């Protein structure tokens, strides 16, 4: 790929189309999208001077065929290196360093109910294992636990399994990932052992969701819900179940393309396009109070 110093929409579109054909998890949709991008390019729809404007227009077109919210042309204000995934990694590291490693809030409410907020992401496990283990081990002493995912926009499936391991009693099949070639699948299981102490699989557990909760955070809520381990309280989530990779196609633009799809072993499907449906629907702003009240009632009963 040629590194561009000036925005040339045709080169960005052509490179994005090539990556779609080579990597998108749904090859038939990739062909439709490349035709759409080429037609829009020929119509002059992408004749803009700014990379941010181009990203917005192309993303709308990429998501117009099957509504895949993991599929996008992402704009980065800071120039990013050309290596695959480097743009997302740099931004992710900044967020990690300013969020206590992805566990920015641990609070004990009345009645022995703990709240652990996981935000803004479920960071790569090699980064996040230590802070998450510390937070979840401390929360393990609570009588009930609320996991707040309302501001979590996704992250690492291995970290999902790590968190689930603190909330279950035994090794459990959580999810399976199927890749584009159709011949490979990977199963995700909770861990047989964890650093620190488990909250375990029997005490009351609630997960807070919002319409901003996305991707791996949705998997965490969905896995626990399908296992009947947690009660999800809040809003329907955004609905993105496809893991993606990123390729730099311009110093400020990254093509984010899903390369697999998730299948839950309990439901036989996933949350793509429909989101995680809360067990207790309510406004996200009210979810913590609702979950706390439910936890107190259950403990009292």
Image: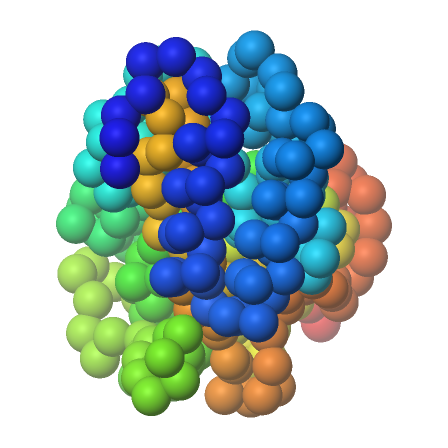
Q: Camera-side residue: 102 or 214?
A: 214
Left or right of 198? Residue 129 is left
At horizontal 50% and vertical 30% (from top left) the residue drawn is: 10
At horizontal 67% and vertical 44% (from top left) the residue drawn is: 39
* Residue 182, horizontal then vertical, whole percent: 40, 84
Q: Quadrant of residue 281?
A: bottom right
The N terminus: image quadrant: top left
Q: Judge whether 115 appears above or below 263 on screen.
A: above
Left or right of 75? Residue 279 is right
Q: Camera-side residue: 227 or 85?
A: 85
Q: Judge whether 169 appears above or below 301 on screen.
A: below
Q: Is residue 27 visible?
A: yes
The C terminus: image quadrant: bottom right
Left or right of 230? Residue 166 is left
Q: Camera-side residue: 37 or 77?
A: 37
* Residue 156, horizontal then vertical, whole percent: 34, 54
At horizontal 39% and vertical 52% (from top left) the residue drawn is: 19
* Residue 300, horizontal then vertical, whole percent: 68, 65
Number of numbered labels in the structure image:
0
Q: Judge whether 147 appears above or below 11 on screen.
A: below
Q: Judge whether 147 appears above or below 22 on screen.
A: above
Q: Residue furthest right?
A: 282
Q: Is residue 257 visible?
A: no
Q: Residue furthest front?
A: 42
At horizontal 46% and vertical 68% (from top left) the residue drawn is: 25
**Coloured how?**
rainbow
* Residue 129, horizontal then vertical, whole percent: 21, 51
């Amino acid at each position: 790929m040629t590194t561009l110093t000036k925005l040339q929409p045709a080169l960005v579109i052509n490179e994005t189309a090539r990556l779609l054909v080579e990597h998108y998890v749904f090859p038939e949709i990739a062909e439709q999208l490349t035709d759409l991008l080429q037609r829009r390019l020929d119509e002059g729809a992408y004749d803009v001077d700014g990379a941010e404007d181009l990203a917005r227009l192309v993303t709308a077109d990429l998501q117009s065929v099957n509504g895949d919210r993991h599929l996008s042309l992402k704009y980065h204000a800071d120039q990013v290196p050309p290596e695959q995934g480097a743009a997302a990694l740099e931004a992710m590291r900044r967020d990690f360093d300013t969020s206590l490693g992805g566990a920015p809030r641990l609070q004990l409410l009345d009645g022995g109910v703990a709240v652990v907020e996981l935000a803004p992401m479920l960071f790569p496990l090699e980064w996040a294992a230590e802070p998450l283990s510390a937070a979840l081990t401390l929360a393990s002493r609570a009588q009930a636990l609320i996991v707040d995912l309302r501001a979590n926009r996704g992250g690492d499936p291995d970290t999902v399994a790590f968190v689930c391991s603190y909330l279950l009693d035994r090794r459990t099949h959580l999810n399976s990932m199927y890749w584009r070639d159709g011949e490979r699948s990977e199963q995700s299981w909770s861990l047989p052992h964890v650093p620190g102490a488990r909250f375990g699989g029997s005490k009351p557990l609630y997960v807070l969701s919002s319409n901003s909760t996305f991707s791996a955070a949705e998997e965490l809520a969905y896995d626990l819900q399908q296992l009947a381990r947690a009660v999800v309280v809040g809003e329907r989530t955004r609905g993105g179940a496809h893991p993606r990779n990123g390729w730099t196609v311009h110093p400020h633009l990254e093509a984010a393309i899903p390369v697999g799809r998730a299948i839950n072993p309990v439901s036989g499907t996933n949350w793509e396009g429909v989101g995680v449906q809360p067990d207790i629907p309510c406004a996200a702003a009210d979810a913590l109070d609702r979950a706390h009240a439910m936890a107190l009632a259950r403990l009292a009963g």
